[in-house]
Image (tube, rainbow, N blue to C red):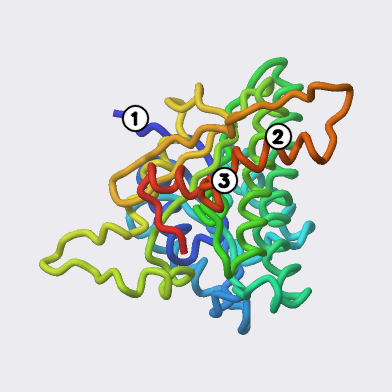
């Protein structure tokens, strides 16, 4: 029986460790040929000397299991290196079908203490990194579609975060980048739909090098039971979204962790006020909005987070 991703080629960024590695292994298990990208810096803040080892080891693990994989150790936040990554997939396997953007770093600080470099570096790796690979992959699919005279197969799975959904006081750079990724995803979904390409985003919760302090109080279960925070809980959704079965899912945001998938709604209007005159006055707005917000939570997103069972860090 054919695997759902047999004959497909996938790129997974940040795939040397953690979530990206689990996602690359799952795509390979489903039959995809995988280009494993990882810049290989040891620090979760993007510090340290880059190493080819994480990408090479993940690619070798796929090959040892009978799959096909090559490693790429470039920095996806660099526009040219991101282009080289997409070209590597095309040169090695003939075309690109799936792009999973996962690479990221953390440089946490309260907004009043954050430096310009701490802001820029996180936005660069997360948001610009997602854009860079998406740009080159989209150009590839558009050209193929024009040549074929119709839609082609293309899948993008981007990585957002609950920090965007519920806020995260010490991560203004990270939360902003993850919110930007959702905007990039929905825009891309609209732009590429006519070419047969879908773009969706996930908000995963998993125990990785990036989140080791966040989940420090949640111990790994004993007795060989799978950790509820294991990246392996997230990878199957990525595999599904990358498959032909998910052709009708586009521009969506899904929260996933520990055996749960929740579909997030787009923001809805909670209340509407019209001026009694031609234009609002300060006094009229005070009379309408002040009573409306009186007694409400400081952040309405907390309510949505509680419904999903999310943790506000």
Quarter holding residue 74: bottom right
Q: Is residue 11 visible?
A: no
Q: Nearer the viewer, mark 2 or mark 1?
A: 2
Q: Is residue 90 above or below residue 39?
A: above
Compute the Cα span from label 3 to label 2: 35 Å
Residue lying farthest to the bottom in this orientation: 48
Residue occupied by mark 2: 187
Secondary structure of residue under mark 3: loop
Residue occupied by mark 3: 294
Q: Is residue 167 visible?
A: yes
Secondary structure of residue under mark 2: helix
Viewer-nearest residue: 196 or 159: 159
Compute the Cα span from label 1 to label 3: 59 Å
Question: Mark 3 vs mark 2: which is more N-terminal?
Answer: 2
Quarter holding residue 128: bottom right
Compute the Cα span from label 2 to label 1: 33 Å
Label ID, residue 2: 1
Viewer-nearest residue: 3 or 303: 303
Secondary structure of residue under mark 1: loop
**Residue under the point 58% across and 60% down:** 103
């Amino acid at each position: 029986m054919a695997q759902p991703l047999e004959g497909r080629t996938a790129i997974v960024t940040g795939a040397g460790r953690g979530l990206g590695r689990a996602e690359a292994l799952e795509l390979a298990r489903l039959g995809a040929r995988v280009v494993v990208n990882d810049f290989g810096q040891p620090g979760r803040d993007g510090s340290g000397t880059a190493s080819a080892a994480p990408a090479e080891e993940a690619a070798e693990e796929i090959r040892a299991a009978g799959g096909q994989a090559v490693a790429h150790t470039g920095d996806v936040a660099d526009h040219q290196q991101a282009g080289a990554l997409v070209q590597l997939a095309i040169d090695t396997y003939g075309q690109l079908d799936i792009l999973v953007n996962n690479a990221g770093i953390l440089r946490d600080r309260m907004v009043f203490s954050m430096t310009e470099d701490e802001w820029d570096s996180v936005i660069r790796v997360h948001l610009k990194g997602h854009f860079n690979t998406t740009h080159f992959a989209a150009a590839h699919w558009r050209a193929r579609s024009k040549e074929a005279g119709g839609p082609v197969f293309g899948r993008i799975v981007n990585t957002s975060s609950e920090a965007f959904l519920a806020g995260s006081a010490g991560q203004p750079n990270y939360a902003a980048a993850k919110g930007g990724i959702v905007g990039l995803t929905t825009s891309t979904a609209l732009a590429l739909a006519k070419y047969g390409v879908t773009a969706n985003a996930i908000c995963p919760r998993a125990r990785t090098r990036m989140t080791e302090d966040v989940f420090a109080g949640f111990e790994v279960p004993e007795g060989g039971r799978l950790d509820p925070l294991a990246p392996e809980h997230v990878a199957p959704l990525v595999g599904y979204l990358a498959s032909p079965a998910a052709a009708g899912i586009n521009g969506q945001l899904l929260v996933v962790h520990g055996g749960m998938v929740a579909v997030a709604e787009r923001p809805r209007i909670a209340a509407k006020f019209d001026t009694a005159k031609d234009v609002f006055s300060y006094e009229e707005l005070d009379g309408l909005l002040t009573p409306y917000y009186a007694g409400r939570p400081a952040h309405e997103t907390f309510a949505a987070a509680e419904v999903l069972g999310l943790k506000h860090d």
